[in-house]
Image (cartoon, rainbow, N blue to C red):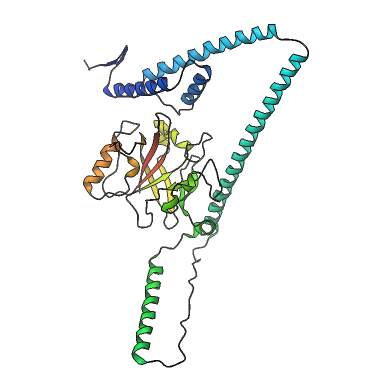
Amino acid sequence: MSEKYKIGDYEFNTYEEYLAAQEDVKKIDFITKEVDITDADVAVRLYTLIRNKEIVFRSKVGLSFSWYLTDVLAKNSQKLLEESRKKEEQKEQGKKLGMAGGLCILAAVVCLGYYGFTLWQEHLESQEFERLQSMQNLTGQMIQDSYADEESAAAAGQNAGQTDGSDAEKKQKDAENKKKAKKKAAAEKPAVLKKYKDLYEQNKDLAGWLSIAGTNINYPVMQTGEKNGDFYLHHDFEKKESDHGTLFIDVRNDYVDRDTNLIIYGHNMRDGTMFGGLKSFMDKNYFEQHPELVFDTIYEKAKYRIVAVCLSKVNYQDDHAFRYYNFLNAGSREEFQAFLANIQQLTVFDQKIDISYGDELLTLSTCNSYIQDGRLFLIAKKE
């Protein structure tokens, strides 16, 4: 007979179910300590977060908590109906009723106006991203293989007058060496892919382009200098302030002389834009149906296979817990194995992560509200 595990009145057949229930208990404890779930507004917000899978329970403990929230909503709805009937019986006639109705209409107009303004802003931002996507696709179709960058050539001027032989020869040799050094540096610098030339000319912070087939993710990816590494957290491609922000690479990453692990950050937007769609990958069927992504840097095209979906949190400086967002390079096989062992503990699904020392990795990271300071991240390896 297989061993059974218990939490309170709940019994579990497998150790995996037991661990999932423990995680759900932690989430429920955190929620009940932070908010009053018997409050109608709080219950509605929690129910909405659970329905939208922004809070995910993986056991019957969490399912029971969801049912309890449903009961709270039902009871509060009944109370609201009874109060509404009483108000209808007691409502005044004439001027008072008219004034109250006018105030309600005014409040509704203000709320609708604000909501409309917000939708209009989101519409404008969506249009901008559609323009960028269209431009990127159009540029990729229209370029010709024969197109090449033109290199500027500068003719070296010659001195008309005669100078002392040794000094003149030395200066000439120094000038020639400098020219050779410049030419060598220019030759070693990669050429921007033709597909991204026009976009790069618009914004030199462009680092590449990320897309996942079958999802809304199809965006430019930026990178700034160290002094303002999170600039695109609140700015769009045009460098205008934006709640959506833009996808961007960790400022510590080198995507030319490539690091072991490139990390791309993006907002978890409720409308599904940016990295708002990553939470769908916590559904195993969805994860299996969307196994690949494309991340081109401005210098190189590349395909990746998504190998893991993980949940973690941002840890404080005095906390010695594992920080997935600090793994950029594997200095040794042992260091890589330590990273793998840690993320294996954070996976959403019961699976063995298929990566090994020497693989080039890509991490997509966003916020997730399953716990305070929660993070959702996907690991992909270059094919």
Above or below, 371 against 94 in this view is below
- Residue 284: x and y in percent read 39, 31
The foreground one among 294 and 373 is 373
User: Is residue 337 left or right of 325 when viewed as pictured?
Assistant: left
Query: Residue 241, located in which quarter of the rendered image?
Result: top right
User: Is residue 58 left or right of 201 when viewed as pictured?
Assistant: left
Query: Residue 162, located in which quarter of the rendered image?
Result: bottom left
Q: Quarter of the image containing the N terminus?
A: top left
- Residue 125: x and y in percent read 58, 43
Q: Count the numbered circles shown.
A: 0
- Residue 252: x and y in percent read 37, 51
User: Is residue 383 left or right of 196 when viewed as pictured?
Assistant: left
Above or below, 100 against 321 in this view is above
Residue at the image position 40 percent from the left and 64 percent from the top = 189
Residue at the image position 41 percent from the left and 68 percent from the top = 186
Above or below, 362 against 74 in this view is below
Query: Residue 65, located in which quarter of the rendered image?
Result: top left
Q: Is residue 232 among the parts visible in the rendering? A: yes
Residue at the image position 35 percent from the left and 92 percent from the top = 165
Residue at the image position 27 percent from the left and 42 percent from the top = 339
Q: Of all residues shown, which one is farthest toward the right?
A: 94
The foreground one among 29 and 152 is 29
- Residue 152: x and y in percent read 49, 73
The foreground one among 256 and 161 is 161
The foreground one among 266 and 239 is 239
Q: Is residue 352 among the parts visible in the rendering? A: no
